Image: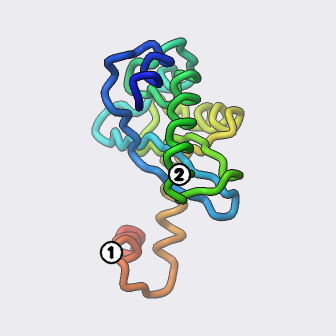
Amino acid sequence: MSSEEKRLINKPSTPRPEIDIVAYDVNWDTVYLLEVKSYLDSPGVPYDEVAIEQKEQSGRYKLLTAKNYRNVLSASLKGHWLQQGLMGNKTKISFGLIAGKIYRGREQEMFEYFKKQGWLFWGPSIIRDKVMLLGGKGYENNAVTIAAKILTR
């Protein structure tokens, strides 16, 4: 982010944004900026820390909880990617969370919140379904597919 962009988010000394995964959905012409949290050996992602809107970004889920930050960051990235020919003018930028564990089993609430925002959410149930689907595919010389096959035996 430029100095001007950092001023726009009221954080002139903020470090470079961290985005865990940038994913492109061809069917929807959408780039997703994703937070990814496994939290397998912890209580999980707390719904109350994600399903909030803050004036300024702070905490673990900055990308998901501060609209101004999302707007400035996505505009900045889109500008860079358009300039480099990496995306088209009509390509949308959206957000999401992939979480291996949700605190206190509030996965359905989390799913509904993300759906309401128009964002992507994969919680433990969806991840499990995706791994099962991948494990059921025919042979592929691909480490991820092979791992899914081993896990789903």
Q: Residue at x 36, y 31 (%)?
A: 43
Q: Residue at x 52, y 62 (%)?
A: 130
Residue at mark 1? 143
Q: Residue at x 53, y 58 (%)?
A: 86
The colour scheme used to paint the residues is rainbow
Assess disc 2: are there few (<14), some (14-19) or many (≥20) residues with their C-alpha within 10 Å of its C-alpha. few
Residue at mark 2? 83
Q: Nearer the viewer, residue 35 or 99?
A: 35
**How many angstroms separate mark 2 from mark 1 (CA)?**
34 Å
Query: In the rendered image, which quarter contains the C terminus?
Result: bottom left
Q: Nearer the viewer, residue 114 or 30?
A: 30
Of helix, strand and loop, which one carries label 2? helix
Type of amino acid under label 2: Gln
- Indicate the quadrant where residue 115 lies: top right
- Residue 36: give its label: none
Q: Nearer the viewer, residue 9 or 47?
A: 9
Of helix, strand and loop, which one carries label 1? helix
Assess disc 1: are there few (<14), some (14-19) or many (≥20) residues with their C-alpha within 10 Å of its C-alpha. few
Type of amino acid under label 1: Ala
Q: What percent of the width, then of the height, locates residue 103?
A: 44, 30
Q: What percent of the width, then of the height, locates residue 89?
A: 67, 51
